[in-house]
Image (cartoon, rainbow, N blue to C red):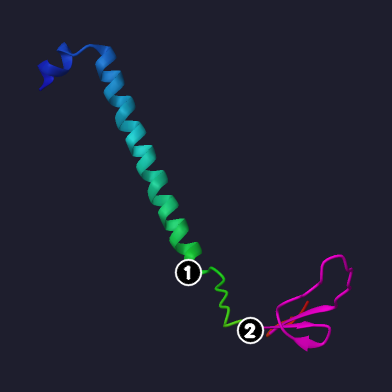
Amino acid sequence: MKKLLLETSFCKVYIIGTVLVSVLIVGIYFSYAMFTVSKEKDDAIRIVTGNLTAKLEVDGKDGNTLTVPAGETKEFTVTLSLSNGQF
C-alpha cells in the first residue's frame, strides 16, 4: 500500500483528494438542507379551503345569461356573492 502511494503521481492524488473533499462537502450540505426542509415543513401554515358556493345575480334576478338584441345597448348590474364574501 505504501509503495502504491509513493508510485502514484501527485496529480492523481490531488484529484482524488479534491473529489473526496467535494463529496464530503456536498453530503454535509445535502443533509443540512434536508434537516432544514423537514423542520420548516412541520412549522408550515396549513390553509384549508372549504367548498365555495357562488350566487350570480343580473339586475337582481338569479341567472347566468345576458341577452342583448343586435344593435341595442344595455347596462346590467352583475352581483357575484361567494360564501365567504361579496365582490
Measuring 78% from the left and 76% from the top, which residue is drawn there?
Answer: 87
- Compared to 73, does 48 lie above or below? below
- Compared to 70, does 1 lie above or below? above
**Which quarter of the picture shows residue 24?**
top left
Is residue 50 rendered to the left or right of residue 16? right
Contact (CB < 8 A) between labels 1 and 2?
no
**Which quarter of the picture shows residue 61?**
bottom right
Measuring 42% from the left and 57% from the top, which residue is drawn there?
Answer: 35
The answer to which of 2 and 29 lies nearer the viewer is 29
Residue 75 painted magenta: yes
Residue placed under numbered mark 1 in the picture: 42
Q: Please provide percent x and percent y for residue 11.
A: 28, 13
User: What amino acid does circle 2 point to?
Assistant: Thr
Residue placed under numbered mark 2 in the picture: 53
Q: Main secondary structure of the magenta part?
A: loop
Number of marks in the rendered image: 2
The magenta segment is 53-82
- Give the residue at the far bottom of this rendering: 61
The answer to which of 3 and 33 lies nearer the viewer is 33
Measuring 27% from the left and 13% from the top, which residue is drawn there?
Answer: 10
